[in-house]
Image (cartoon, coloured by chain):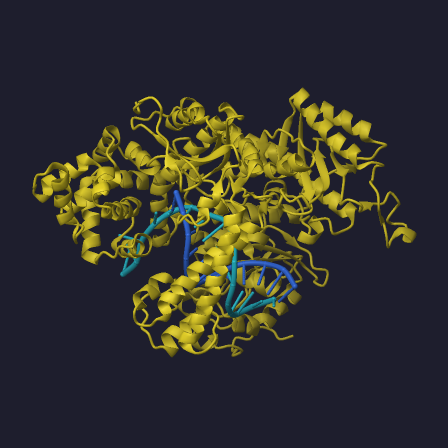
Chain colours: A yellow, B blue, C cyan
Amino acid sequence: MASLCPACQKCGLYKTTTGTVCLAGEGPKNAKIMVVGEAPGREEEKTGRPFMGASGKLLREALRKNNLDSVFITNTVRCRPPDNRKPTAAETKACREYLDYEIERIKPKIVVALGATPTKVLFKGKAKVSQHHGTIIDDASKQYRGYVSYHPAAMLYDPGIEHTFNADIARLGRTLRNELPSTDVKWSIVRRGNVAQFIHEFTASPIFSFDLETSGLFPHDAKGWINCIGIGLPEKTWVIPIMAPGFYPSRKDPKNKKNKKKHYYRGSPWSRGDALKFLIRFLIHIQKKTEKIGVAQNGKFDNLWLARYIGKRFKIHFDTMLASHTLDENTDNDLKSNARQELDAPEYDLTTAEKKGNCDPFKLYQYNARDCGYTLRLKKVFHRRLKQEPELERLFFRLVMPAARALEDIELEGKTLDMEKFEELGLSLRSREINLVAKLRKLIGHEINWDSPQQVRKLLYDDLGMECTVFTKKGAKSTGEAAIIDLKGKHPIIDAMIEYREVTKFYRTYVKGFRAVIVDGKLYISYKIHGTRTGRYSSRIHSIPRDGSVRNLVGAPPGWKFIQADISQAELRIIAQTSSDLEMRKCFLEGIDIHWRTLMFAISAGYIKGEYANRVIETVEQIDGVNLRITEACERLLEVGHEAAIRIWPGWKEGRKKAKAINFGYVYGMYEKKFIQTAKTKYGWEPTWDEAHACREGYFSLYNELPNWHSKQKRLVKLNGYVRTMFGRKRRLPGIESKDKMKRMEAERQAINAPVQGTIGDWKAAVLVEVHETVDRTKFRLVGEHHDALLGIVRDGCEDDVLPQIVQIIRKPKLLKEFKIHMDIPMDGEVEVGSWGAGVAYKLPNIRKAA
DNA sequence: AGTGGAAGCGCG
DNA sequence: AAAGCGCGCTTCCACT
């Protein structure tokens, strides 16, 4: 065992450091805790002591606050790496023996790794700090226990980490002082002998949590099964055993050696499987009768299983996952993290296989009981916190939870798919893929993997010697679309490659991928209410291609028609409302299409070049028979509107798309470079830099209140650290305090975007809830949402009964009043009837203009 | 063998 | 100097 060596030459760092070589740790010899950082920085190098810089200050402050004085502080690597870079694997390896030496000498009870570098070295398999922070790592082969948190320097760049770091250190203190409360969950298995007692306790309790352990994650598959159902009560958790058909735990004592090998037996834990179903239905009945508060973690999932397999479900009043997300959209919302963070719960997770029931049933039941128990305890914590923030409390109980319940029905409904055409599409894509691969091989004369960016990079830029103009984030020569689109015409493989990517993407993601979630001609795709930081939902259905190849196959069962109901121009309306921009307001109050407005302005001012100027004059001439000058012609065309103009010259459709790019890009803080990129790949338009610049300048001179709105949002987030949607949803942006300017600017742009995007998300949720609760289910059913649109099916002939009602709800959901939201700008809805993306616009029966 | 980060591409 | 936002899925590839 070598001691520390001030003349160490085990790696190259001794050559570059200007100060101490092999900097030693510092602290009492009998320290109980050893904290291990990454490597010395400038201050450490200068002073020869570890953790002396800005992050050291944060660490020492956190330790002091928690009365942790018996701490030895050291680093993974003991010389300062040049250019503020991280130490390499070779350097950490070379330095390892010094760390081992210090651990051996100090004999700490707990070794705390701060950041990924020491974690990787000390605790193999736990390298993901964001996942393992705050947990005690017990490794029987080691003399000490492990603990992981973020490196304090991380909070200087991402101040959002501060909360977690401080909580981790506080918990470390409690662990050391043995202050952790007794956290485990008291539980029993429900048996025939105690079922009466269980029902008695359940009935008496005003609240309960529930959780299912299932054979998989897809509730709509008829081949699945429920392993057990846990019911958490304040005093105790009960687990109802079910397990796989024909595969139940034995009543014999598994500890008895004679039973050890096969403590499973065929047959129900109760004499008849139906008895268990009956019991669950009875509990559901009791909940309804006694108006018991139902609590669950992501209960939509459990209720889908119950609905499928038991035929009934509980009513969920409080979902801890959604509460966690409402309270803080930046933290993890999973049960284990929250139980650890909020309740000091120990680690109790099982492997995926075990969770599916592939283990000793007792183990699974215990796990189930813990999930239930912690869920109920978390409810208490989160509810208390919600009460402290009435705006979030209202958001949660009036919008988030009702939407969660509505989504149970929506996901259960599924989306009807034209299976014949779906399979046809699959076959045609497959054969195109095969042909393209053959063609590509012929063109280059040998075989490569066209999915491998590495191999494609080598082919394009090394073997074929083409020039690269676009680079990836990490600086490699890009092989993405934006890069190879420039190489078009230089080599015939480019066109084939672009087609190959499109074909494989479609086949793999939308045919093969979707096929896995189709049951009996219906597509079952779930939505995550907590899927985004802004309040939108997330779902894999959201990326369904616009081109219709898959989208148009989504329809309705016989006797019904598919509909899509949009909140029209949702984002720009909210921007008009919150920015009070006069020109934007004018557009919406007078019913002018805003993209069309932007386009006519850009053409008239000469920002968009090409044939458009002539086309404006020509189009007007065809309509009015007069020849106007460009400015007047643009004004006239603005009056005429885009629909009429497109009828004269279809190219106006493309023109409007370009204006859309301008609106959505510049309004959220895009600049010329990125604008040219997105215009090129997303809108098929390649403006020059000057054109892009002129558009940008012109844009803000037309909508001249937008810059003020931008500065207002920046001021707000600097002042409060967060911004809100109209519905009160918070978007916290700790990055605004970062010392990294890029991070601060990112936070500023998010402060502009989030209230708009989030308000639409909330608005749509309000519409979804009201439609679900008020529209006649025998005539209409929701089958999904799409950010600013609802998807549904309407019974043949019932269009005029329900569609006007839905448009009315889109315009003014009832919840606006409760949330005290007042709109000067009218919202509006438009409905398309017919298979998704291929429907026809629905005309409201009686002429009724938006107020 | 399983995991996680990139890269690439689909969407509003 | 550099600067849209928000997602999910598939594949490759390096790492353990």
In the image, taking residue A78 as reference, residue A650 lies left or right, namely left
Residue A545 on image: x %, y %: 42, 49
> In the image, is residue A30 above or below residue A841?
below
Q: Nearer the viewer, residue A439 or A448?
A: A439
Q: Quadrant of the C terminus of chain A?
A: top left
Residue A503 on image: x %, y %: 44, 59
Residue A87 on image: x %, y %: 49, 68
> In the image, is residue A611 above or below residue A406?
below
> Residue lying farthest right?
A258
In the image, taking residue A11 as reference, residue A311 lies left or right, namely right
Picture quadrant of residue A460: bottom left
Q: Image point 18% across, 34% down: which residue?
A: A639
Residue A184 seen by the camera: no
Q: Quadrant of the N terminus of chain A?
A: bottom right
> In the image, is residue A518 above or below residue A484?
above
> In the image, is residue A28 above or below residue A187?
below
Residue A168 seen by the camera: yes
Residue A403 on image: x %, y %: 51, 32
Q: Image point 45% across, 48% down: which residue?
A: A544
Q: Image point 67% across, 49% down: which residue?
A: A349
Q: Nearer the viewer, residue A123 or A392?
A: A392
Q: Count of labels shown?
A: 0
Q: Nearer the viewer, residue A351 or A72?
A: A351
Q: Nearer the viewer, residue A316 or A595?
A: A595
In the image, taking residue A216 as reference, residue A640 lies left or right, namely left
